Image (cartoon, grey):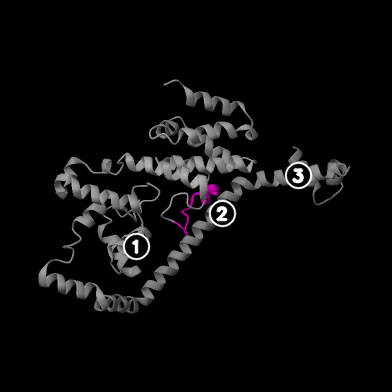
Amino acid sequence: EKGLVDSILKVMSAKGEDLQEVPIVTLLYLSVHPTIPTHLLQKGVDVVAAELLNCHDHIIRELCVILLKALALHDSEAVEKVVPAEKKYLFVKDIRNPQLYGGEYGGLVQDYLQTIVGNRHDQNYLRDILTEQDMLDLQLTEEELVSYENTFLELDADCGGTLDIDELKLLMVLMGEKMDQYELQELLEEYDTDHSGSLDFKEFVVMMKGWKTRFGTGVTKAYNETVKRGHIGKAAREFFRWWNKSKLEAAQVQEAKESRARAMQSNVELQMRYLDHENLRYRRKQEADLRKRGVSVSDTYRNNPVTSKRFNNASS
């Protein structure tokens, strides 16, 4: 209301890259507030921070990564859209401690990000996913909803509102269920009604609500659990994989080829986009080194038949 964020952005636009530390720290401080991060996203702070990921000052780059991670807890899709393709590796989930957002930093940064995670939990963001009609259809009591919500929040470390197969595996461990990777995949596919590759909160509630009767009741349950799970179920899945081994291997090979082709295409696009810039930066660095040694840059490049053409092109 007082125009504070606009003022900060004006200060940032008026300063050089090496003078952005104080404004960014101010934005980090504001991001701890439960509702201000949404306002920051509306004002385009994520866009400004993403542009500074290419800053020469490594401290400013790190601060921008932390700021973007903080904003991603409120809208991960918006942040993902503005992060440059060559910088997305900075936002990959920490495989060593995936259930603690910011765990790769430790110390104050970890505590800072966990504070924002706590803010998001207090906002009950999961309940917005369920409509009143969903509540009626699922016949959920308030006690059940709170229980499912707390369980989901424990697993959804980045507040993204979905659970992937690794988080689903952790859930099975917490529930005391023993499932192999193939059974987990089948479980995910069974309840992933929108085929997104993960479970949103509504799909999770549907799974948990019907968990006790998933295989039926009485004799039917005993039969299904024996056939679909346990030693017989495992043997059946292994036999299926053996029987369809050639088909599965062919599919895996095809997927690997397509994945490699996509990666190569992506690399080519990145090279086409950034190669000239990198070459120019490297050439300027060489020229600066030559000048420090008292060598004439123009004579050095023009007298060399290999570099004279490149020098002339760069000069033009």
Q: Residue at x 52, y 32 (%)?
A: 26
Disc sitting over residue 267 in the figure? 2
Q: Position of residue 179 (x, y in %)?
A: 31, 69
Q: Secondary structure at mark 3?
A: helix
Please report whichever mark, 1 or 2, sits nearer to the chain's N-terminal start: 1
Between marks 2 and 3 in the image, the one whose residue lies nearer the viewer: 3
Disc sitting over residue 169 in the figure? 1
Answer left or right for 229 relative to 101. Answer: left
Work out whether residue 183 or residue 152 is closer to the camera in this orientation and state it. 152
Mark 1 and mark 3 in contact? Answer it, CB < 8 Å: no
Please report whichever mark, 1 or 3, sits nearer to the chain's N-terminal start: 1
* Marker count (numbered): 3
User: Quick one: label 2, few (<14), some, or many (20+) residues within 10 Å?
Assistant: few
Which image quarter: residue 10? top right
Work out whether residue 107 or residue 273 is closer to the camera in this orientation and state it. 107
Q: Position of residue 295 (x, y in %)?
A: 88, 44
Q: Which residue is mark 3?
A: 285
Range shown magenta: 85-97
How far apart marks 1 and 2 lie (CA) works out to: 33 Å
